[in-house]
């Protein structure tokens, strides 16, 4: 496939992935949203459908990696040329940022209502409504819409959790079609991957929010830092390396494990 195919497919596919995935987080989190407090099941299935939609859109154009961990795993496995890896990763990051901006535009009024509600921002503000930096938490009140964060902050555990979850995802993608004489699953593969993502969210997502995709976390986190959101709080950059490094390590392990056990 051409460089333009990779750029267009990965940018659009990843943008739709983040729009729908971040969208369900916004729907569940924000005040004045009809889906507020819908819960973890809504989030996990919402992200699964987001993967399904993005993969169907981009599958015939770029192969629908939509995730640097998948790209790294495929490069190690041999299905993707290493020379194409930087273009895949750059396109995915751009798409993730576009998707995060679209979430903000879609829920613009809800963001305003949420971030100006005294119950939401009261704990973060001091006298005269100014942000109290000493009392403010590391993660702002809407950061979870844009990126992930741990329930228990323990760098080693958080990193290992992301690695394990990503190995499951990438290995499931790499082994698609092995029982079909190596011909692959075609468009059915997108559905299988989406269901795997739902399963990971339900089973392994509790500790860290299951980034399992570096740009899914990094791109929206950058957008959170840049958007003019009132009382948005910090972007928790101290944690940001974990949902980038963990999935990349997991994708590399999955590619190596595939070559050893399945190739």
Image: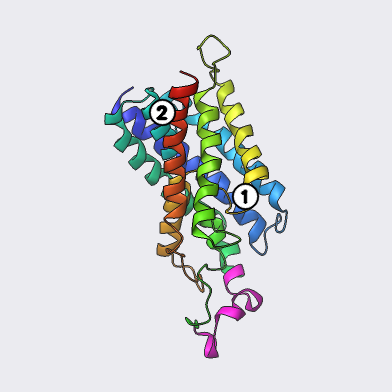
Extreme-bottom residue of the structure? 127
Considering only vertical position in the picture, is 250 above or below 234? Answer: above
Mark 1 secondary-structure assignment: helix
Indicate left or right for 199 with 89 as reference: right
Write the start and end of the magenta stretch as one range. Answer: 114-130
Q: Reading the chain from its start, which is encountered first: label 1 or label 2? A: 1
Q: Residue 18 placed where, x, y %? A: 51, 46
Left or right, 138 with respect to 41, comes to left
Residue 80 x/y as whole percent = 36, 25
Kindly give the residue lying farthest to the left in the view shown. Answer: 83
Q: Nearer the viewer, residue 125 or 137?
A: 137
Q: Secondary structure at mark 2?
A: helix
Quadrant containing the C terminus in the rendered view: top left
Q: Which residue is mark 2?
A: 74
Q: Residues within 10 Å of mark 1 (few under 14, many from 20)?
A: many
Q: Disc 1 and disc 2: Cα gap in Å?
A: 29 Å
- Read off the residue under disc 1: 24
Principal secondary structure, stretch drawn in magenta: helix
Q: Residue at x 47, y 32 (%)?
A: 254
Where residue 247 sits: x, y (%)?
Answer: 46, 43
Residue 242 image-quadrant placement: bottom left
Q: Nearer the viewer, residue 136 or 2?
A: 136
The magenta stretch spans residue 161 = no
Nearer to us of marks 1 and 2 is: 2
Q: Is residue 7 above or below residue 246?
A: above
């Amino acid at each position: 496939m051409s460089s333009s195919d990779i750029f267009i497919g990965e940018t659009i596919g990843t943008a739709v992935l983040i729009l729908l995935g971040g969208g369900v987080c916004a729907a569940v989190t924000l005040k004045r949203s009809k889906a507020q407090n819908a819960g973890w099941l809504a989030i996990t299935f919402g992200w699964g459908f987001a993967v399904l939609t993005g993969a169907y859109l981009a599958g015939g154009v770029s192969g629908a990696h939509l995730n640097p961990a998948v790209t790294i795993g495929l490069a190690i496995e041999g299905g993707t040329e290493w020379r194409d890896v930087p273009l895949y990763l750059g396109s995915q990051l751009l798409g993730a940022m576009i998707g995060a901006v679209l979430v903000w535009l879609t829920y613009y009024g809800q963001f305003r209502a949420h971030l100006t509600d005294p119950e939401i921002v009261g704990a973060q503000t001091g006298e005269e409504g100014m942000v109290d930096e000493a009392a403010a938490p590391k993660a702002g009140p809407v950061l979870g819409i844009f990126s992930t964060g741990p329930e228990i902050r323990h760098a080693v555990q958080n990193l290992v959790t992301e690695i394990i979850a990503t190995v499951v995802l990438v290995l499931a993608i790499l082994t698609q079609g092995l029982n079909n004489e190596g011909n692959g699953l075609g468009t059915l593969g997108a559905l299988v991957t989406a269901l795997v993502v739902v399963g990971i969210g339900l089973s392994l997502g509790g500790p860290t929010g299951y980034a399992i995709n570096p740009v899914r976390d990094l791109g929206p986190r950058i957008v959170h830092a840049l958007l003019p959101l009132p009382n948005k709080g910090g972007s928790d950059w101290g944690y940001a390396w974990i949902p980038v490094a963990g999935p990349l390590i997991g994708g590399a392990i999955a590619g190596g494990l595939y070559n050893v056990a399945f190739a």
